[in-house]
Image (spheres, rainbow, N blue to C red):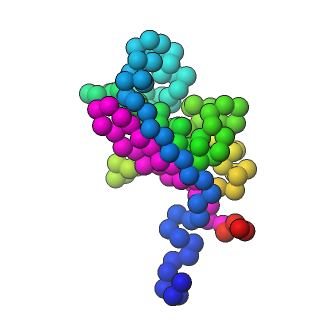
Amino acid sequence: MTGGEKWPPVGGWILGLGNDLVEVSRVEKAIQRHGEKFLQRVFTPEEIRYAGGMKSSGKHFAARFAAKEAVSKAFRTGIGKELNWTSVGVIHGSQGEPLVVLDALGKQLLQRLGGDEVWVSLSHTETLAQATALLLTKSPRPL
């Protein structure tokens, strides 16, 4: 460092990194097969409202599915006892950016791991959806 940099780095230090790639057709088939039961088991009401209202809803649901997987990988837990599908939600910020919203279980896990926030980036085409998640802390961690 030369002395002029902001510290901690913008966002903080990385505690975890997760990535996921999902075929849009896989999520679309699950929705067709299981309908509302699948949607309510996997997605938050806000996600269902947003993605369900889009013209090509499948790719928007798939991107959120990938985000949940990516966040669970950043937490190093996967989806299960410590983190439910609906523990992780994706909403839009004031500039349209994806923001992660955690339920009480997710917030508890974030706190236990020493994290302060989760960032996510989403991408999708007609056939694939991808998400990358960062688990960040503002406090330095010993190496």
When the figure is inspected, residue 128 is found, relative to residue 3, above or below; the finding is above
User: So how many labels did they put on this image?
Assistant: 0
Where is the C terminus found, in terms of image quarters? bottom right
Classify residue 108 by image quadrant: top right
Q: Tell me if 129 is positioned left or right of 9 in this view.
A: left
Q: Tell me if 132 is positioned left or right of 114 in this view.
A: left
**Residue 17, percent from left and from top:** 56, 52
Classify residue 127 by image quadrant: top left
**Residue 136, percent from left and from top:** 58, 58
Q: Is residue 128 magenta?
A: yes
Q: Residue furthest bottom?
A: 2
Task: Please report the bounds of the magenta region as a residue range.
Answer: 116-139
Q: Residue furthest top?
A: 33
Q: Residue at x 47, y 48 (%)?
A: 132
When the figure is inspected, residue 130 is found, relative to residue 142, above or below; the finding is above
When the figure is inspected, residue 110 is found, relative to residue 52, above or below; the finding is below
The one nearer the camera, 131 or 101, is 131
**Residue 83, percent from left and from top:** 65, 36
Please tell me whether the stretch drawn in magenta is mainly helix, strand or loop.
Answer: strand
Q: Residue at x 54, y 84 (%)?
A: 1
Q: Is residue 70 magenta?
A: no
Q: Tell me if 60 is positioned left or right of 18 in this view.
A: left
Q: Is residue 64 visible?
A: no
Q: Residue at x 47, y 33 (%)?
A: 65
Classify residue 141 by image quadrant: bottom right
When the figure is inspected, residue 137 is found, relative to residue 18, above or below; the finding is below
**Residue 48, percent from left and from top:** 43, 27
Q: Is residue 94 visible?
A: yes
